[in-house]
Amino acid sequence: MAGTLNLTITGMTCDHCARSVTQALQAVPGVASATVDLKAGTAVVQGAPDLQALIAAVEDEGYGAAVKP
C-alpha cells in the first residue's frame, strides 16, 4: 500500500549528509520520492517501501533512522 512515512534521521550535520541520506532513501525499491530536512532531522518518504530497508539504507550511510512518532 502506497503512503507516506515520516522518519527521524540522526547524525546529519551538513548539506552533504542530507544529500547522502536522500540518495540512499531514493535507491530503496518502492520509494516514489524522499525529502530530507537537515535542520529538522527528518525525512518524508512517499511510496510503498519496506520500512526495514529504509532504515538499513540510512544506517549503511552512517546515520540513524527511526519512525517519527
Image (tube, helix red, strand yellow):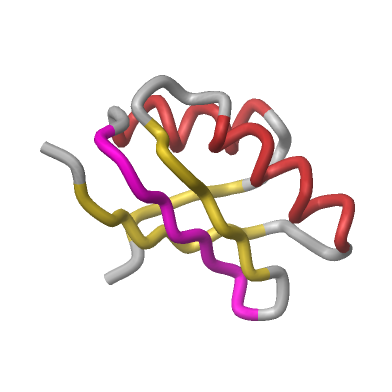
Q: Nearer the viewer, residue 14 or 2?
A: 2
Specify the quadrant that holds the N terminus.
top left
Q: Residue at x 31, y 31 (%)?
A: 49
Q: Residue at x 61, y 79 (%)?
A: 40
Residue furthest front in the image: 32
Examine the rendered structure and indicate whether residue 47 appears above or below residue 45.
above
Count of numbered circles in the view: 0
In the displayed orientation, state which residue is furthest to the top.
Answer: 29
Residue 26 in percent (x, y) is at 56, 34
Residue at image location 57% in from the left, 48% down from the top: 64
| Left or right, 42 with reference to 54 | right
Judge from the rendering whether residue 56 lies leftward or rightward of residue 30; answer left or right: right
> Residue 46 location, x and y as percent?
36, 49
Frontmost residue, 33 versus 64? 33
Residue 31: which quarter of the image?
top left
Judge left or right: residue 1 versus residue 40.
left
Q: Quadrant of the C terminus?
A: bottom left
- Position of 47 relative to 39 (above/below): above
Instruction: Determine the residue located farthest toward the left in the rendered image.
Output: 1
Is-magenta flag for residue 44? yes
Q: Nearer the viewer, residue 15 or 1?
A: 1
Q: Dominant secondary structure of the magenta stretch?
A: strand
Residue stretch rendered in magenta on the structure: 40-48
Of residue 13 and residue 25, the one placed in the foreground of this image is: 25
Q: Which quarter of the picture shows residue 59?
A: top right
Image vertical order of residue 26 relative to residue 69, above or below: above
Inspect the magenta stretch and tell me whether residue 37 lies in it. Answer: no
Q: Residue at x 31, y 55 (%)?
A: 5
Q: In the orientation shown, which residue stands out farthest toward the bottom?
A: 39
Q: Residue 57 at x, y = what percent?
A: 55, 29
- The image position of residue 53, as x and y in percent, is 40, 25
